[in-house]
Image (cartoon, rainbow, N blue to C red):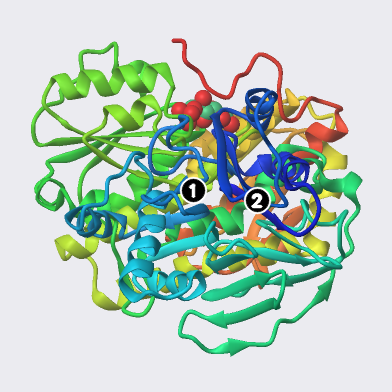
Amino acid sequence: MCGIVAYIGQKEAYPILIKGLQRLEYRGYDSAGVALFNDGNLNILKRKGKVNDLLQFSKDKNTAGNIGMGHTRWATHGVPNNTNAHPHPSGDGDLAIIHNGIIENYEPLKKALKNKGHIFTSDTDTEVLVHLIEEVQRETKTDIAEAVRLALSQVIGAYAIVVLDQKDPTRLVAARKASPLVIGIGKDDFYLASDATPIIEYTKNVVYLNDEEIAVVDLKNGLEIKTIANEPQVPVIQEIHMEVERLEKGGYDHYMLKEIYEQPRTIADCMRGRIDSKNNRIYLGGIMEHKKRFQNAKRIIIVACGTSWHSGLIAEYLIEELARIPVEVEYASEFRYRNPIVGEGDIVIALSQSGETADTLAALEIAKKRGAMIYGIVNVVGSSIARLTDAGSYIHAGPEIGVASTKAFTGQVTLLTMMALNLAHERGTISESEYQKLIIELENVPNKIKELLANNEENSKIKYIASVFQNAENALYLGRGYNFPIALEGALKLKEISYIHAEGYPAAEMKHGPIALIDENMPVVVVATNHSAYEKILSNIQEVKARKGRVVAIVEQGDVHIKNIADFVIEIPKTAEPLTPLLAVIPLQLLSYHIAVMRECNVDQPRNLAKSVTVE
Ligand code: F6R
């Protein structure tokens, strides 16, 4: 989320920055801006919208300068507008900063700075950071590099930043923690960026900055790196090999595939700052601020549509099992028109990637009018649902462009899992050892998904299964417990992008109707990763096989029984049962993707669908 790029050298900076921002636009396109140093002046140009809007705006402006920085934003703090766009200047106008990440403790820092006379013009956490650096510089009378270092030691959160001081214009200072930053080393110049894509046509030599490191690129003294704890580091220069042509969509054929592969990172982003790994504790700001209401809630009602509704169903299993609060999950479109019994003491949670879904918004308005507390779990910052709710949590999945939701779904499930654990711990409905075990397992999920996505054997198997079933007319998806909603989600993914009719069912319900559909042509995808209902799932698979159905089973690594009876098995890494949905959904996303590609469907923009459903 957010792309940053900077240049210092002899060339004109502006074209390098613009091209770099266009490459980084996949990281967000809420606003774009540049800061250029020329003739003793720092010139900031920024605009709400895409890089093209910035280009239009800057057409007749002065864009000269050999030192500069650029930013493309995916809003986290503050709505997308011209004021919240980066770069942000310090109060005295001497410094400019670009930032990718989230400063978690920006509120107390802002308060303290306000008490010292600082005036803020934007709603961003980034502006607080540049004022903090300015304040440290003023108080300690140090140079910009040291001021950045001292300021960052006060900061909690994630950042990749570049800072320019117009009093010291032969260098740029950069730092990173949990957000990426690459330094390109040219002949007599330097490039800094969120990834290597803005750099590769100028130099192949790069240094990947490590967490909690500060780099100074200086036209006189070259590159120097130290840690925030002030220990000097030896820069490790690496050679990169990347073809410029592969850069579109980050080198993926479709946004959907890119977004599937982003999930290890987006799930980690969702957890960042919310899990204290040292003490194994979860802290969800929105919940803790309304701790009493959550603790005393009579019930939780979840309203959502489509894929978000499937996340809600998983939450029902998680919250009831772990926190022992009754949960109801409603289609927002039904809830809003059925005169629901809802009022004080109820908590209504809206789940929405876009934050703009008309039915979900209307359902929330009804709940609010009737006195319920309303809570939003959304991806798009500043969206209508985010503004309407009393409290909420962003999932921080970054822009989801493919119409079929993938990373937003796993972001929602991650957030809801943290919510269930946070509530369970506060209410004392979970043992300390189970709580700690699930937190550790949850933190391991991004690596397990990485492992799954990197497993060539399993990936070729998924492609092969896709080729076998690409001409199917129908498909049945079955699952139990936590993975029943995954069966629904797998079926939805298949039908929306490949136009194959698919239905998801609780596995045991099959015998009450859908079993009549099974014959030798019917693919039956079974999510068989449950530990507690393993024997039951095994029997359901046998029932399908007895009717000659063709079974694709999603199993955990090391499974022996299902392997012997299913036609195809896809293995996922082992995890705790409540977390299996996060892993089991990945092969189903890939299976639909490959089938849709084989059927030559428009994967990213399936017919009749839109990313944001703002009509009823
Ligand atoms: C399916 C999909 C849709 C959305 C639904 C709700 O892949 O993307 O079913 O989940 O339109 O949208 P949001 O989450 O934006 O409210």
Q: Nearer the viewer, mark 1 or mark 2?
A: 2
In this orientation, does residue 515 appear? no
Q: Is mark 1 within 8 Å of ligand 1?
A: no
Instruction: Please state, as top left, top right, bottom left or bottom right, where the C terminus lies in the image.
Output: top left
In the rendering, at what x and y percent does residue 231 appear?
53, 89
| Residue that badge 2 annotates | 68
Mark 2, residues whose alpha carbon is within 10 Å: few (<14), some, or many (≥20)?
many
Residue 466 relative to residue 155: left or right: right
Q: Is residue 615 above or below residue 276?
A: above
In the rendering, at what x and y percent does residue 581 appear?
51, 53
Place residue 459 in its image quadrant: bottom right
Query: 540 or 456: which is nearer to us?
Result: 456
Return the mark for residue 262.
none
Q: Name which residue type carries label 1.
A: Gly
Q: Is residue 454 above or below residue 334?
A: below
| Residue that badge 1 annotates | 411
Query: 469 or 146: which is nearer to us?
Result: 146
